[in-house]
Image: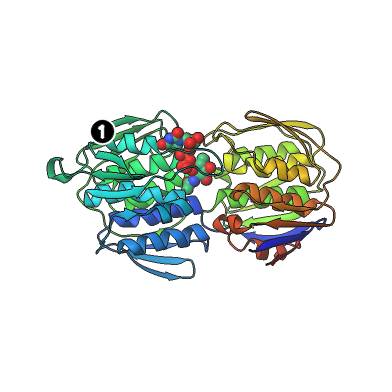
Amino acid sequence: MDKLIIKGGEPLNGEVTISGAKNAALPILCASLLAETPLQLSSIAALKDIGTTLKLLEIMGVKVDRNADKVSLDASEVTSFEATYEMVKTMRASILVLGPLLARFGSARVSLPGGCAIGPRPVDLHIKGLQAMGAAIHITHGYIQASTLHLPNRRLQGARYYMDLVTVTGTENLMMAATLAEGTTVLENAAKEPEVVDLAECLNKMGAKIAGAGTDIITIEGVEKLNGTNHNVVCDRIEAGTYMVAAAMAGGEVTLKNVRADLLDAVIDKLREAGAEVTVNGETITVKSDGKLKAVNVRTAPHPAFPTDMQAQFMAMNCIAEGVSTVIETIFENRFMHVQELQRLGADITVDGHTALVKGVSHLDGATVMATDLRASASLVLAGLVARDETVIERIYHLDRGYELLEEKLAALGAKVKRAN
Ligand code: UD1
């Protein structure tokens, strides 16, 4: 199994180009199921989760043509409406085929995702939302079996639906389903994440009538059919944030290209508070730092507040910052698995429920650590960049799910990092 070996202590300098967002690409790839003509996408990062989604779509009969960061998806002849347990267990976001399949074909069979490393993560709101639109849904043998065959014209029916919790993929699934429903759907307490907005923009170009994406009320007027379009996926704000923290911790001057600062307000504010110099210029962000940082308190919450997907990286930063900080996780039940690994590098962290108390230490010492989920793995890479001597990160397949060309991009900035098996 691949591992990453990092020799810490090198400053980072130079430019890094940010890839298209994984979390925007996944729902947009699934949206291809809604279209009767091919959907042409660009800025599709070379990531494991993208490969898994393309494979899932191909199994269903979607013709996929991939060339570098461009993908063409032709769903004119879909033959299967099923996402098996084997597919869903490797990637929870496979649940995103449920809404499109049901809306266009009136039938879907999708495995329940089951537990995952960062908590139980149920999909009850996806199911209740589709039921509110009239779908008949039965959970049998670990599968969600959904149908619209009993409905007028076999179409989902527009509905008002209030989501108890802000859910990103839940909002996306219901928004996609509602595009082909009969009548108007209003989603209340919707997720405002930029990836939801990017999906809505793509769907509107396909012929959907969606208003309010990016606010907490999204209104979708159903249409009879959607067609393909061209769409360039929004930049990955979490990848960008990770490189910004890397530059702040390691010291040096790093310029991020192909990035949107307006999607990173909470992250940029916290980096400035920590003492890094952050300059925005059009589609670039430059982070300059001497590596001497002040501890900052972090509390995760839905967008536009501080993202849970940046929590682990800021925890790593606080480990070597001056002072004491609290890191509060409000989105996921069990998203502190990186703590034990950071402790193995010498970090001083105490966890009490959803709060971690981090006391900055003068330095971290390299060790062998194990990646447990995508963003936890990123925090270990960041810690490794500043730790004394060598840090070996095992199980880096998690990183390959979400960071395109990670070691190449870091090495180009001057980090001493290599992959081994
Ligand atoms: C998405 C992102 C993930 C990010 C998360 C929160 C993708 C592919 N993944 O995950 O990177 O960390 O948003 O920003 O976009 N919940 C329920 N019932 C539901 C749905 C969710 O209880 O039906 C709970 C979850 O367990 C969690 C919270 O709501 O505690 C938020 O989860 P959600 O926004 O749905 O996360 P994902 O969409 O899975």
For the residue with label 1, is its CB less than 8 Å from the closest atom of ligand 1? no
Q: Is residue 25 left or right of residue 181?
A: right
**Residue 346 occupies quadrant:** top right
- Residue tagged by mark 1? 159
Query: 276 and 371: which one is in front?
Result: 371
Q: Position of residue 238 (x, y in %)?
A: 58, 48
Asked if 256 appears above or below 272 in the picture, the reply is below
- Amino acid at dot 1: Ala
Q: State how many labels appear.
A: 1
Q: Is residue 411 left or right of residue 205?
A: right
Asked if 302 appears above or below 75 in the picture, the reply is above
**Residue 309 occupies quadrant:** top right
Q: Position of residue 202 (x, y in %)?
A: 37, 52
Query: 393 and 130: which one is in front?
Result: 393
Looking at the image, which residue sits at the far right? 362
Q: Is residue 77 left or right of residue 54?
A: left
Instruction: Tell me the crowding category of disc 1: few under 14, some 14 to 19, or many 20 or more residues within 10 angstroms, Cα based.
Output: many
Query: 324 and 217: which one is in front?
Result: 324
> Residue at left 31%, top 42%?
140
Q: Position of residue 204 (x, y in %)?
A: 32, 49
Query: 150 and 23: which one is in front?
Result: 150
Q: Which element is circle 1 on?
A: loop
Q: Is residue 220 left or right of residue 386?
A: left
> Residue at left 52%, top 35%?
302
Asked if 145 appears above or below 402 in the picture, the reply is above
- One can see residue 192 in this view: no
**Quadrant including the C terminus:** bottom right
**Quadrant including the N terminus:** bottom right
**Residue 66 occupies quadrant:** bottom left
Q: Position of residue 349 (x, y in %)?
A: 75, 35
- One can see residue 189 in this view: yes
